[in-house]
Amino acid sequence: MFKMVASKIQLNKVESEICTLVKEFCSHYNKANAETEPLVARITGGWVRDKLLGNDSNDLDIAINNMTGEQFAEKLCAFLQDRGLETHSLHTIDKNPSKSKHLETCTTKLFDVPVDFVNLRSEEYTMESRIPKVEFGTPYDDAMRRDATLNAMFYNITEDKIEDFTKKGFQDLNDGILRTPLPPRQTFIDDPLRVLRLIRFASRFNFQIDPQTYQAMRDPGIHQSFNHKISKGRVYTEMHKTLTSANPFYALDLIQGAHLSRVIFTTNESSPEIESIYENLDQHLKSLVETIPKLLKSHTTFASVFPGMQEPLILSLVLSGFKGLKGPDPAKPKNSIPLAGVITKEGLNFPNTQVDNVIACVESEDSYHNLVKNGKSMKRSELGFALRKLGKNWQMVHFYNLCLDYLRHGDEPIPHYDEFYKHVHDCKLDDVYTLKHIINGKELAKLLDRKPGIWMGETLDRILIWQLDNPDISKETFIENLNDIVHLP
């Protein structure tokens, strides 16, 4: 997989100003501290990768060799102030291993661009914890602890050159290969989240994962370590970025090929039926990968709306097999919610909005299938009420069910879904969930000279039915016929 990779970093105007400033400060510091190890500043990680690929990046992380990031930033700001140059406040992010912040980072702005400063470091893990012992390290140490060789290159600001201490980063970037700097099994045991990170980078850049690295991802010991060491918050961060990437189905293919489906889409609930679903989940993902991209290529309407519903739709398709099953609500354990929602919320830590989206899709299959089958023969009010129950999710529910039927039956059901979709549009019911009553409850009580009460809910429903069946009638005409419409005793 050949990539057009630059052999030299091309700095834009602001990057050039930042690097010139940092270089001048390092030179000034080294002259004043000639007896100590020379101060060297390096831009690390994703910025180097992206610049070599010809992409812009605002992810500026500068690693320092002989002091902390905070010490460097303080001295740099003093250097700027002595020369009458603008400075910004410093913000130090303290060590917080529970949130994967293993060494303090200091952030400030240079030329209005956020820059993070941190010292070069080495990491030593134990089998029991994902939290490493962190110490000052050499450039080699810092490069070898990273998740992939192509993310381990540095741009040496002082010498204006790329440094590839793994000896493989530049070539792997050029070839589109993701591999770990250290032996992959040890890398993944140390921090199993790197499995998901490599899958995310593969889907983002359409890169391949090195066979030895990918084989290590299949190791059951790493799968077990994943559940033991990784917080759900970190899983969410990676899965959110992956499912919203340009190639999410490639990521699903890598997940199923590494037998990671159950590891990622997990729940503590267990039953023979749940076990059966998990046994077939890798194959289900493989089927999704083989079919849904074809539908996206052939169905222009689906392709046009897909970007706006990509993440919850894919999640729903992955979890479709859990339809009808329930588990305890993570927020209120005494209550039960659909199991697809439990997995999305507890297993993946997705926000409630996406949990609701997934539940709406997965639990809609039977009712929506009947709606597609019978919708054209329904009165406008019946169809409108059915769509209002789905709310703003109705289009996502529509294409979710189209995908499921396509997965099972190929092209055969597509015309039925397209005809129903067109019928909804022709009936001007696309946004029926936003339709408001032609009069509110206060107006209704006043017009009928009745006190507000439980009668109002049912009456307002009858009014909405009338509105849907008479969409072009004015409010004045409605009021004239109010008594005939509401049929109150």
Image: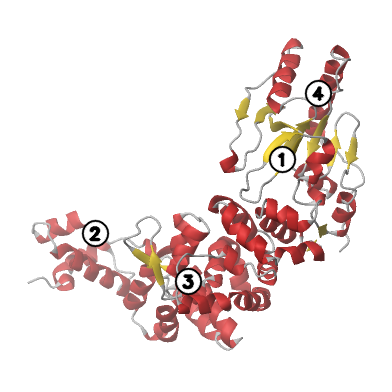
Q: Which element is circle 1 on? A: loop
Please report whichever mark, 3 or 1, sits nearer to the chain's N-terminal start: 1
Mark closer to the observer (1, 2) = 1
Can you say whether 488 is above or below 81 in the image? below
**Amino acid type, mark 1:** Asp
Rendered location of residue 297, percent (x, y): 68, 74
Marker disc for residue 21: 4
The residues bearing labels 4 and 3 have C-alpha atoms spaced at a distance of 54 Å
In space, the residues marked 2 and 3 are separated at their CA atoms by: 30 Å
- Marks 4 and 1, how far apart in space? 18 Å
Of marks 4 and 3, which one's residue comes earlier in the chain?
4
Q: Which mark is residue 137?
A: none
Residue behind mark 3 = 397
Mark 4 touching mark 3, by CB under 8 A? no
Q: Quadrant of the N terminus?
A: bottom right
Determine whether label 2 and label 3 are within 8 Å by CB: no
Q: CA distance from mark 2 to mark 4?
A: 66 Å
Q: Are marks 3 and 1 in contact (CB under 8 Å)?
A: no
Nearest the viewer among 302 and 185 is 185
Q: Is residue 100 above or below residue 24?
A: below
The answer to which image quadrant residue 207 occupies is bottom right
Colour option used: secondary structure
Task: Read off the residue under disc 1.
Answer: 59
Which badge, 4 or 1, is on the more N-terminal residue?
4
